[in-house]
Each structure stands twice: as structure tokens, then as C-alpha cells.
Image (spheres, rainbow, N blue to C red):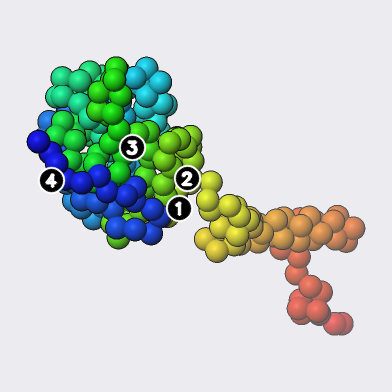
């Protein structure tokens, strides 16, 4: 029935990512090129009834928000009916896109469609990171990378998010941003100088037997002779 769609080669790094437009368990449809226009897309294939896949996507779901902050999207694709996809979305906790490829066209085009006597048709385990240029930036086939590694690859492409600790040199910031954090204010310095000057003058007044206050130099006072 679907013989027209040949099983294509698994896309390699640097190759154009095969386009798809699939229905989502969360509602609506998703076209790959609509997402790559916004940033990197993590395309991960799942098997709806597989517990190991559920556990992996649960771990990936814990990094989903950070991937979104890095301008990326997580897109899960499985050979599944709508109900199976919805169940997988609930079990895994993925909030973005859990797509169902019930016609098996996308799984064929990505070279991942396989058949098993017990499971029937399914997509091999694989994860791809598709860049904004719609090309495969990273690929893991027959295995899956740790969610932290996926996040690192997405951030590498987008340059986001900027970690809060990235402005590392606090000293530099203080120098560039102004003297306030590092230096005493001019008023405070003048005040300290004035206090020291007053203390010295007060000491002189006591020695000369003059009252503390303004010390008038003797040379300025008129002298009466005679």
C-alpha cells in the first residue's frame, strides 16, 4: 500500500534532513521546516509500547525546558496510532511534540523503518539534531545520547542560553561599570582627609594655647608696635 515511498538512506551529518509534516498527540500538525526556521530541532524516534523508550524520553523531558531556552525544540516520532502516541506523550512527560507516523512514510524516508513479528512495523532507535539550515548537525543511530549531551549540541548551534555565570570577571565588571563597587566615593575620601586635617589643627591649637577652630596664621594678624 505504501510501496511508492522507498526506504531511504539514514541521513548522515551534513545531509539535508528529509521533510515531514505529521500530526501531533498534543493536537495540530508539525512541519519540520517550520521548526528549523526558529532554531535547532531534536528529532528522536520512539516505539510506543517500549518501556525502555518511555524511560529514555522521560529523561529527555527533564531537559526539554532547557533545550527550549536554547532556542531548540524536541520532536518525537513513532510508528503509532493517535491513541498510542497520546499514551506515549503522557507516559514520557514530553510537552512539545509527540508525532505519530501511522502511514510509516517519515520512518521510511529517514531509513529507519523495520519490521518485527511481535511488534510489527517500528522505527529504529535514533536521534538527530537538525540545524536551522535544515541539515543534519548530529546523528546517533541504533543508540541514544544522554539528554545533557543533546542540550550541549543544541546550545553549541544556537549559542543560547547565556549561562548566568558567563560574565565571569566580577572585577572587570566593577572596573567597566564604574568605581562604585571597588572604590570609595570622592565625598568619603574628602571627609576622611578633612577629619585628619582637623585633628592636626586641633593638636596645634592645644600646643599654642589657642582655642580649637579656625587657626589664623600669625603672619596674617596685624601687629601693633609701640
State the quadrant of the C terminus: bottom right
Q: How many neighbours does mark 2 have within 10 angstroms: few (below 14), some (14-19), or many (20 or more)?
A: some
**Residue 152, image x, y percentages:** 47, 45
Q: Nearer the viewer, mark 4 or mark 2?
A: 4
SS for dot 3:
strand
Q: CA distance from mark 2 to mark 1?
A: 6 Å
Q: Which residue is mark 3?
A: 44
SS for dot 2:
helix
SS for dot 4:
loop
Q: Earlier in the sequence, mark 1 or mark 3?
A: 3
SS for dot 1:
helix
Query: Seen in the image, is 4 located left or right of residue 141?
Result: left
Evaluate if marks 3 and 4 touch, with contact meaning CB atoms under 8 Å apart. no
Q: Which residue is mark 1?
A: 156
User: Residue at the spot x=37%, y=33% of the render?
Assistant: 125
Q: CA distance from mark 3 to mark 2?
A: 16 Å
**Residue 45, image x, y percentages:** 31, 34
Relative vertical location of residue 1 with respect to residue 169 in this rendering, above or below: above
Q: Nearer the viewer, mark 3 or mark 4?
A: 4
Q: Which residue is mark 2?
A: 152
Q: Which residue is mark 4?
A: 4
Residue 112 falls in image quadrant? top left
Q: Nearer the viewer, mark 3 or mark 2?
A: 3
Q: Earlier in the sequence, mark 4 or mark 2?
A: 4
Q: CA distance from mark 3 to mark 4?
A: 24 Å
Q: Is residue 210 visible?
A: no
Amino acid at each position: 500500500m505504501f510501496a511508492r515511498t522507498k526506504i531511504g538512506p539514514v541521513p548522515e551529518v551534513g545531509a539535508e534532513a528529509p521533510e515531514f509534516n505529521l500530526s501531533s498527540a498534543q493536537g495540530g500538525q508539525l512541519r519540520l521546516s517550520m521548526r528549523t526556521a526558529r532554531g535547532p530541532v531534536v528529532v528522536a524516534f520512539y516505539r510506543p509500547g517500549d518501556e525502555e523508550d518511555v524511560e529514555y524520553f522521560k529523561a529527555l523531558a527533564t531537559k526539554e525546558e532547557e533545550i527550549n531556552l536554547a532556542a531548540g525544540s524536541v520532536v518525537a516520532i513513532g510508528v503509532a496510532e493517535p491513541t498510542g502516541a497520546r499514551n506515549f506523550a503522557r507516559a514520557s512527560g514530553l510537552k512539545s511534540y509527540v508525532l505519530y507516523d501511522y502511514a510509516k512514510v517519515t520512518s521510511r524516508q529517514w531509513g529507519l523503518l523495520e519490521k518485527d513479528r511481535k511488534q510489527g512495523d517500528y522505527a529504529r532507535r535514533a536521534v538527530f539534531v537538525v540545524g536551522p539550515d535544515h541539515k543534519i548537525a548530529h546523528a546517533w543511530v541504533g543508540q541514544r545520547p544522554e539528554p545533557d549531551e543533546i542540550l550541549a549540541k543544541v546550545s553549541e548551534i544556537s549559542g543560547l542560553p547565556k549561562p548566568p555565570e558567563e560574565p565571569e570577571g566580577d572585577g572587570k565588571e566593577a572596573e567597566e561599570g564604574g568605581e562604585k563597587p571597588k572604590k570609595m566615593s570622592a565625598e568619603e575620601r574628602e571627609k576622611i582627609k578633612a577629619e585628619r586635617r582637623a585633628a592636626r589643627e586641633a593638636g596645634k591649637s592645644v600646643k599654642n594655647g589657642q582655642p580649637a577652630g579656625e587657626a589664623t596664621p600669625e603672619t596674617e594678624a596685624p601687629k601693633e608696635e609701640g
